[in-house]
């Protein structure tokens, strides 16, 4: 009986660990309801697998009634992660004219800023922090190779932010902050860099019965 009890305890422990895994909740799509638009939540460290998950969520948002361009909020709460994944997801956000939001109590740091910058409209109620991208530890050891790698990341980061219409001064500030530190941006900083941008969503189509009433001639 003791063995059975130990086996059951192990099963419960494994189940608890499975529920706690962050990968299952990193990218979450929530359909719109009433006046609330559809939402894609991106939470936690950005990894390459998030690109496929976000692509699927974006496709769902596009094909769901009320989820057209400008009607989807991408809510982000992340300390950063893979810069290439961040820029790829950012380009999907911009292609679909999604909005990006950092809600109160949330943080958007490091590579996460590339997602925020991609929004057609951008709202920040939480904290935004920047620093120089990490150089990946991929076996490159020589100083020349490391410099070439850094220069490549530097160039692509600048090009991406220019593509998103954000001030080049943001990139310069990033490069001045060591990767093991964070420069927290004030509201004034974000406005100056162009990270905050309020855009009114497109008007929702009138209900079908409203069109019918409008089409009825007066006096009938």
Image: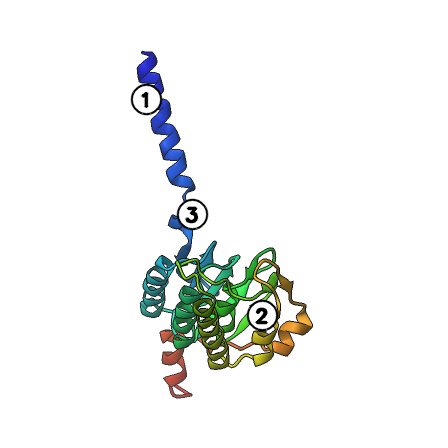
Q: Position of residue 82 (x, y in %)?
A: 44, 61
Q: Residues within 10 Å of mark 2 (few under 14, many from 20)?
A: many
Residue 28, relative to residue 208: is it above or below?
above
Contact between labelled residues 2 and 1, with CB atoms less than 8 Å apart: no
Q: Residues within 10 Å of mark 3 (few under 14, many from 20)?
A: few
Q: Residue 76, which numbered label?
A: none
Residue 108, relative to residue 202: is it above or below?
above
Q: Is residue 117 left or right of residue 193?
A: left
Q: Residues within 10 Å of mark 1 (few under 14, many from 20)?
A: few
Which residue bears the numbered disc 1?
Answer: 7
Which residue bears the numbered disc 2?
Answer: 174
Compute the Cα span from label 3 to label 1.
Answer: 25 Å
Compute the Cα span from label 1 to label 2.
Answer: 52 Å
Indicate the quadrant containing the C terminus: top left, top right, bottom left or bottom right.
Answer: bottom left
Q: Position of residue 67 (x, y in %)?
A: 38, 69
Instruction: Return the disc, 3 or 2, that comes first in the chain's sequence.
Output: 3
Instruction: Return the disc, 1 or 2, that comes first in the chain's sequence.
Output: 1
Q: Nearer the viewer, residue 208 or 132?
A: 132
Residue 14, relative to residue 213: is it above or below?
above
Q: Nearer the viewer, residue 149 or 61?
A: 149
Q: Nearer the viewer, residue 115 or 198?
A: 115
Among the 4 quarters of the image, the one containing residue 149: bottom left
Among the 4 quarters of the image, the one containing residue 51: bottom left
Which residue bears the numbered disc 3?
Answer: 22
Q: Position of residue 106 (x, y in %)?
A: 57, 57
Q: Is residue 36 visible?
A: no
User: At numbered mark 1, what does the secondary structure look like: helix, strand or loop?
Assistant: helix
| Residue found at x 58% / y 65% | 131
Compute the Cα span from label 3 to label 2.
Answer: 28 Å
| Residue found at x 64% / y 64% | 183
User: At numbered mark 3, what does the secondary structure look like: helix, strand or loop?
Assistant: helix
User: At numbered mark 2, what does the secondary structure look like: helix, strand or loop?
Assistant: helix
């Amino acid at each position: 009986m003791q063995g059975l009890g130990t086996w059951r305890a192990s099963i419960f422990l494994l189940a608890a660990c499975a529920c706690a895994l962050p990968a299952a909740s990193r990218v979450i799509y929530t359909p719109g309801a009433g006046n609330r638009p559809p939402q894609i939540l991106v939470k936690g460290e950005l990894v390459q697998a998030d690109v496929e998950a976000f692509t699927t969520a974006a496709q769902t948002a596009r094909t769901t009634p009320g989820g057209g361009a400008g009607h989807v909020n991408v809510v982000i709460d992340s300390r950063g992660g893979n810069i290439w994944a961040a820029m790829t997801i950012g380009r999907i956000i911009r292609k679909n004219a999604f909005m990006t939001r950092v809600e109160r109590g949330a943080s958007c740091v490091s590579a996460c800023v590339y997602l925020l910058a991609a929004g057609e409209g951008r709202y920040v109620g939480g904290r935004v922090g920047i620093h120089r991208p990490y150089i990946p530890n991929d076996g490159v050891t020589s100083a020349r190779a490391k410099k070439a790698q850094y220069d490549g990341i530097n160039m692509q980061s600048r090009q991406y932010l220019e593509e998103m219409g954000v001030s080049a001064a943001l990139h310069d500030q990033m490069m001045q902050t060591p990767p093991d530190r964070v420069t927290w941006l004030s509201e004034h900083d974000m406005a100056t860099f162009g990270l905050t941008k309020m855009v009114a969503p497109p008007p929702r189509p009138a209900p079908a019965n409203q069109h019918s009433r409008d089409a009825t001639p007066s006096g009938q």
